[in-house]
Amino acid sequence: MAPPLTTRARAKVNLDLRVLGRRADGYHELESLVAFAGVGDTLSLDPGADLSLTLAGPRSKGLAADDGNLVLRAARSLAAARPGLRLGRFHLVKRLPVASGIGGGSADAAAALRLLARLNGIAPGDPILREVATQVGADVSVCLDSRARLMAGIGEKLGPVLRLPPLFGVLVNPGVGVETVGVFRALGLKAGEVTSEARAQNLAAPASAADLLGYLATTSNDLAAPAQRGAPVIGEALDRLAALPGCRLARMSGSGATCFALFDDCASSAAAAKALQRERPGWWVKPTLLS
């Protein structure tokens, strides 16, 4: 019997996030420089006749292996688009917090598509994977490659892959789930309202970490304020990160509640994570490399 196919579902981190406006159909136009962390979930696929999903891991409590799970939705969507697709039993080890702004469910769905592509001989660049990813969820497309790039629109417009310098970070989730729909509602934009212009999709990769930090200092996350109104503990997390020795930047990712801080080196980020974990033992705190 062949061993199961396995892949990692890395956490997506929005280094910045601009809301450009709200379209007439109600969707918000976004623009975000995205990187991926060294921490994530693990998904495996045991080829077989019947599609199924089992769950394990420290963050699996409360998750359901039902039709609403993005892993199964991605698999069924690809099967509908590619008749005769070989399927099997998925097993997800959930380590990332749920509803936390780091694309955990989207990364899992993208991982499912990658595994099914490998099983069925579908090339990684086959357009069908991107088409299905866009159907399943806004962030699934960028998670397919899990490589740094500028994403725009509602997530379907992807700039070229960027070679970012290594970023030593700490991810922190204060233990609250944030509803993305509620955050956008709190933003209060009317249909058809435009707030700012888009950047060029060919954003150049920074030459050094210092250049990237300098660039990020001129940007922000437009969803941070409305997210904090619904979950004030996000502000506490940001304040604690900013106060850690060596912190160069503290910011919220996505629609929250996960926040991140950037440091100059691995030793500084590891020491900061240890200090914060001692101070807030109930929080999810992970030192990681972003790239």
Image: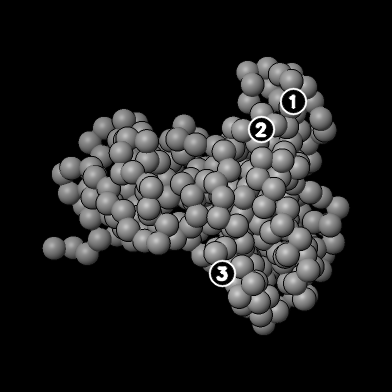
Q: Could you say where residue 217 lies in the image, as x and y percent from the top left?
A: 84, 57
Amino acid at circle 2: Phe
Q: Which residue does the image show at 49% across and 36% down from the upper left?
A: 137
Work out which quarter of the rendered image holds the N terminus and state it.
bottom left
**Badge 1 vs badge 2, beta-carbon distance below 8 Å:** yes
Q: Could you say where residue 8 lies in the image, as x and y percent from the top left?
A: 43, 60
Vertical order, 235 against 27 (above or below): below
Quarter of the image holding residue 29? top right
Depth check, mark 3 against mark 2: the one in front is: 3
Q: Which residue does the image show at 81% across and 30% down from the upper left?
A: 195
Mark 2 residue element = helix
Which residue has dot 1 on it? Answer: 189
Amino acid at circle 3: Pro
Q: Which mark is residue 184?
A: 2
Say few, some or many: other residues with alpha carbon within 10 Å of mark 3 (under 14 / 14 to 19 / 20 or more).
few
Between the C-alphas of marks 3 and 1, the distance is 37 Å
Quarter of the image holding residue 78? top left
If you read the primary sequence from the N terminus, does the residue marked by circle 1 or circle 2 appear first?
A: 2
Instruction: Between residue 226 and residue 116, name the one nearer to us.
Output: 226
If you read the primary sequence from the N terminus, does the residue marked by circle 3 or circle 2 appear first?
A: 2
Mark 3 residue element = loop
Instruction: Between residue 249 and residue 97, name the one nearer to us.
Output: 97
Amino acid at circle 1: Leu
Q: How many marks?
A: 3
Between the C-alphas of marks 1 and 2, the distance is 8 Å
Vertical order, 179 against 271 (above or below): above
Q: Which mark is residue 281?
A: 3
Residue 284 appearing in the image? yes
Q: Could you say where residue 266 lies in the image, as x and y percent from the top left?
A: 66, 79
Residue 288 appearing in the image? no
Mark 1 residue element = loop
Q: Which residue does the image show at 80% across and 56% down from the upper left?
A: 216
